[in-house]
Amino acid sequence: MTIEIADRLVKLRKKYGYSQEELADKLGLSRQAVSKWERAEASPDTDNLICLAKLYGVSLDELLATDEDIDTIVQEQVKEDTPAQEEKVEVNKDDHVIFVGKGGKKVTINDDGVTCYNADGTVKKHQFDTKMAVIGAIEATLFTLAAVAYVVTSAILGWWNIMWIVFFIPEIICSIARAIVKRNANHFNMAFVAVFAFFLVCLFLPVALAPAGITMPPLWHPMWVVFLAIPAYHSVVGAINKVLGKEEEKDEDDDPEDPEDKN
């Protein structure tokens, strides 16, 4: 597909007020397929060309407006869609999504950003998720501050055996930030919050309040119920996500090469 046709597809889609995802839903395709058309990296097959022409109220000649005849375009599309070159999408525990393209090239998408690989496995391009990189830098800074607070406070007050709970705080704060950025409450580290609350009440507060003459009874046994908050939290979040039509671990990052995302 030529750049001229790709640009025309973008203009027609925007003229009729469709997002790439909305157009993909109407055609029964993935958003990535529409994105590839609009970047001139792939061509719609014959059925999709006809659907696009009907959707936009134009003829195939007006839609394509190219010196190539339709038979040539169809032949190119058939060649692209041979089983040996078929693209696929994989998901594993380390990367949220892996797009495997023609010739063995692939693109991985995870919390670190987007990485493009050559067919031989070498990295061709890596684009960081700027927001997640900033959160990572903030977490590293907070962890350093927590280490300083642990050493200084423990050296002054002798709280070496209880001040270590400050190391939970950076992850708790940054997990809140990740949940907000990703717009997914599952990124909030409820497990860290529960463990932090358990040791704060059972271990830290009795020692910290003792110099003020305040005595707290042992709370190790009743405080274990705080751990029930972990499955309860994720059950509620999962139910809310289902109501909102979201997948549990769906990555909301946009395709960085999507022309619409660059605007």
Image (cartoon, grey):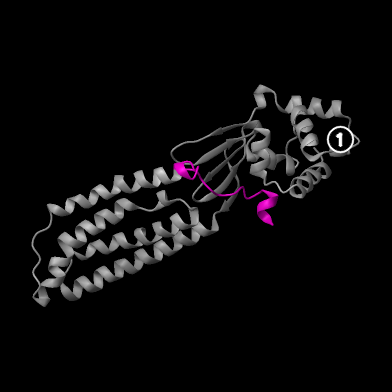
- Kindly tell me whether residue 161 is visible in this rendering: no
The verdict on residue 52 being magenta is no
Disc 1 residue type (three-letter): Ser
Q: Which residue is mark 1?
A: 59
Is 242 above or below relative to 224?
A: above
Taking depth in this image into account, of 147 and 49 the one nearest to the observer is 49
Is 155 above or below relative to 26?
A: below
Q: Quadrant of residue 155?
A: bottom left
x, y (%) of residue 120?
60, 36
The verdict on residue 251 being magenta is yes
Residue at position x 77%, y 49% in the image: 15
Residue at position x 69%, y 57% in the image: 263
Q: Quadrant of residue 64?
A: top right
Is 17 above or below relative to 181?
A: above
> In the displayed structure, does residue 62 sit left or right of residue 167?
right
Residue at position x 20%, y 70% in the image: 154
Q: Main secondary structure of the magenta part?
A: loop
Q: Residues within 10 Å of mark 1 (few under 14, many from 20)?
A: some
The residue stretch that appears in magenta: 242-263
Q: Quadrant of the N terminus?
A: top right
Is 77 above or below relative to 165?
A: above
> In the displayed structure, does residue 69 sit left or right of residue 132?
right
Tag 1's secondary structure?
Answer: loop
x, y (%) of residue 195?
25, 54
- Kindly tell me whether residue 135 is visible in this rendering: yes
Specify the farthest residue to the right. 67
x, y (%) of residue 129?
54, 54
x, y (%) of residue 126?
58, 50
Residue at position x 19%, y 50% in the image: 225
Taking depth in this image into account, of 192 and 8 the one nearest to the observer is 8
Tally of marks: 1
